[in-house]
Amino acid sequence: MNENNNRKTLEQTIKNFCEVSTAKFNNEKLEILPIDTKEYRENVVRTRTMNKTANGKIDQAVRIVEDNNSLRTLGAYIDNNNETSVQWEAILKGQSKILKN
């Protein structure tokens, strides 16, 4: 997400995707990875807001992924400024073991 995102629009997009794909969205596992400038990312973490509008507030239960931390989705690590090679090495090692079996 970046400062131009609107929370309501994002929520509606996710709802629409789930309806057409029959996927289920697990709100208890919701994590947000701010993208944009370093200043913007730090502001999101500090203020728990996506943008300057009233509907940009981020619920306290939602984890905001700070710089130097990763978000894992569908087995992939996504982040801002984090070294993920250690995590990928473990995944590749596990996959290699599966292939050998």
Image (spheres, helix red, strand yellow):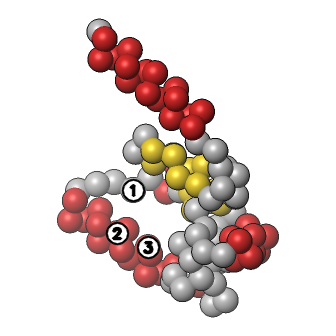
* Percent x, y of residue 14: 37, 68
Side (left or right) of 58 relative to 98: right
Side (left or right) of 54 relative to 92: right
Hey, what amino acid is under mark 2?
Answer: Lys
* Percent x, y of residue 76: 45, 44
The answer to whether 24 is drawn above or below residue 47 in the figure is above
Residue 25 disc label: 1
- 54 and 88: which is toward the camera: 88
Residue behind mark 2? 15
Q: Residues within 10 Å of mark 1 (few under 14, many from 20)?
A: few
> Looking at the image, is mark 2 or mark 1 earlier in the sequence?
2
Hey, what amino acid is under mark 3?
Answer: Glu
Callout 2 touching callout 1 (CB < 8 Å):
yes
* Percent x, y of residue 73: 45, 48
* Percent x, y of residue 18: 29, 62
Hey, what amino acid is under mark 1?
Answer: Phe
Measured in 3D between alpha carbons, the distance from the residue under mark 2 to the one under mark 3, in whole angstroms, is 6 Å
Residue drawn where x is 58% and y is 70% of the image: 35
Measured in 3D between alpha carbons, the distance from the residue under mark 3 to the one under mark 1, in whole angstroms, is 10 Å
The answer to whether 16 is drawn above or below residue 97 in the figure is below
Residue 11 disc label: 3
